[in-house]
Amino acid sequence: MWDLLLKGATVVDPLNHFEAVADVAIENGKIAEVGADLPAGSARVVEDFSGKVLQPGVIDCHVHLAEDCGSPYGMRMVAMAGVTTCMDMAGPIDNILKIIPEYGSGINCAILQYAAPGLTIESNNPDLERLRRFTDEAVTAGAYGVKILGGHFPLTPESSANVIRVANEKGVYSAWHAGTTENGSNLKGMKEAIELSDGLPFHLAHINAYCRGAVMDNLEEAKQAAQLLIKNPQIYTESYLSPKNGTRLMCDSEGNAVSHVTRNCLRQVQLPENKEGIEKAFLANKVWAIYDAGGYSDLMTGVDGLQYWQKNKTDVSAMFNANPPMPRTYLAQAKRDDGTFVVDSIATDGGGLPRNVIIDHGLSLVRMGILSVSEFALKSSLNPARMMHLHNKGHLTPGADADITIYDLMTQKPVATFVNGQPVLKNGQIVGRSATVICSERGVKAVKDKGIATYVADPSEAFPTRLKI
């Protein structure tokens, strides 16, 4: 007997080039069979999803789950958006492991520890030995790898390059929000990151964030960013579709914005890069503070947002409408000459930041004919699974993990999700609990000691070759 039989949906599996109305059988948390008219009598539980689309579980390979994003509900917000696996792109690892037992939602989660001066590392110019210790400590604590938050808290060019070098040396996952003390989070910063990495592989975060018109016309920036990626196939990437970015509004003792991204956003709307500029941005409805709305994070602006920011002594996460539409659309569809996507995955940079819109916005591209449903599944599931070295996810081959997302193409909303065959999202409610942390063998003990399940993967493997539909 199968444990569960999902009947009648249009099943989309880009790895196996399958797109048809079919049934999916699940047994012991794995895909047992995919085919037409599978016998309902062979399953303990049967659920009908006729008229819906079923694909391998959506994987968001760029989210933020820590409480400092505005609330502890990031993992639940991700799950409500139809995601079954995610990768937190900052940590801190201790905070996320602390909140998982109470606020987890039953999904899988990898965590990258950020190297940020004054927060997780002492200075913006740590030497090689300090970076080696930092990396070892992060991975032993359960992190899947490390992240440079260059756009917000930049390191020197030399130290930034050394983070990537050490990560490759030690076989851990590495990601970079482009930017150093020399160049910001823009096209110049992206070029610098590629040059400094010196041919080593890494995950270059949210390509659209470097195409906001800071250097030249934003669409031309997107085209140049695509050419840089084509010339550097060792770099794997994602971009997101929301117009809103994410940043922090913290100011230093002299009243200046600490985050370089906040400075860029204030400059973009022609306001001072300090407290005065942030105050004016709130009153002009140019910035939104993220706050705990009770079970989820939400946004406020105007006088309410300003007062909230002041009450919290400027230590507030926030969003600006910083992402122009043309680069977002261009980067979602751009392809290499061989038919593979230039930007490998659709992500959100969401989580606790309320922009978890892979399904919502991604299906707009499907309905406009910009992506096919199979291409959407490739960019939202199979490609991020391969980027994260999760060989048993992102496809529906018999024996693969039974991580599944089911959505309504017309409403562009998730209908149900399953992780290892267990329901997570059902009837608009999260029914899953806790989480499974994706880590290397080195992190298993630290995670299990906190009573949290683990899923072991090997980030030291080479990034896989790219696939096309």
Image: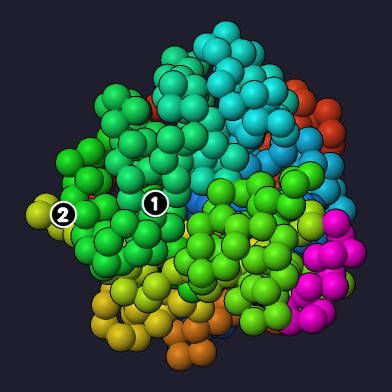
- Whichever of labels 2 and 1 marks the residue nearer the N terminus, that label is 1
Q: Is 155 situated above or below 306?
A: above
The reply to whether the magenta stretch includes residue 246 is: no
The reply to whether the magenta stretch includes residue 311 is: yes
The residue indicated by pointer 1 is: 186
Looking at the picture, tell me which residue is in the foreground, 327 or 54.
Answer: 327
- Taking the view exactly as shown, the residue that stands out farthest to the left is 337
Q: Give the range drawn in magenta.
A: 301-313
Mark 1: which amino acid?
Asn
Q: Is residue 407 left or right of residue 434?
A: left
Give the number of the disc on residue 336: 2
Residue 291: image location, x then y, percent: 79, 68
Q: Is 15 situated above or below 233?
A: below
Residue 136: image location, x then y, percent: 63, 17
Quarter residue 18 falls in:
bottom left
Mark 2: which amino acid?
Arg
Which SS class for mark 2? loop
The reply to whether residue 346 is visible in this rendering is no
Residue 120: image location, x then y, percent: 70, 30
Query: Dividing the image into 4 quarters, which one contains the C terminus?
Result: bottom left
Which SS class for mark 1? loop
Mark 1 neighbour density, 10 Å: few (under 14) some (14–19) many (20 or more): many
Count of numbered marks: 2
